[in-house]
Image (tube, rainbow, N blue to C red):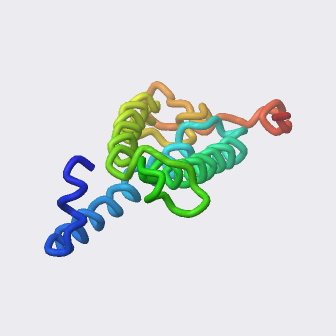
Amino acid sequence: AIPYHHWTLSENRIGFVVMYSLTFFFANFGPNATTFIIPAEIFPARLRSTCHGISAAAGKAGAIVGAFGFLYAAQSTNPAKTDAGYPTGIGMRNSLIALGCINFFGMLFTFLVPESKGKSLEELTGEIDEEENGQTVELPVSSSTSRTFPV
């Protein structure tokens, strides 16, 4: 974002493609893992599918807000250079800097997500208990776990 004008020059198009490719790779590598894999591990078993759906929907809603917000924010500060029908924005460079700051805070908040510590889903939900001799034994399912849970 800071050397934005440098990347818009035609002689730097190869570097721009490399930067864009790396950005695209890491945008899909990190956030997709936290929005798809982590929810399946940390939500309680009874609510896992519901919470996973809510998590996915929140991610999609955030993407929509971000895409439209970026479209408006990236408009030029000069009213003569804005696209037809759009108000003036803060400019492409400032929008990219703001996006970078938001991504940085997203990375920090990702560290607040609880870790499953290598345990299986059964161990996390308490469906398996260990005996004294180190062998795992499956706990009997009580009638309370087979009831539906209103959300």
In this view, which residue lies farthest toward the left? 11
The relative height of residue 85 versus residue 120 in the rendered view (above or below) is: below
In screen coordinates, is 4 left or right of 131? left
- Residue located at (25% from left, 71% from top): 17
In screen coordinates, is 78 left or right of 14? right
For the residue pair 129 and 43, the one nearer the viewer reads as 43
- Residue located at (32% from left, 49% from top): 93
Tally the marks: 0
In screen coordinates, is 139 left or right of 113? right
Residue 65, percent from left and from top? 59, 48
Residue 29, percent from left and from top? 37, 57
In this view, which residue lies farthest toward the front? 80
In screen coordinates, is 5 left or right of 120? left
Q: Which image quarter: residue 110?
A: top left
- Residue located at (35% from left, 48% from top): 96
Q: Which image quarter: residue 5?
A: bottom left
For the residue pair 136 and 82, the one nearer the viewer reads as 82
- Residue located at (61% from left, 59% from top): 85
In this view, which residue lies farthest toward the top? 132
Residue 18, percent from left and from top? 22, 68
The relative height of residue 130 versus residue 98 in the rendered view (above or below) is: above
Q: Which quadrant, please, contains the C terminus?
A: top right
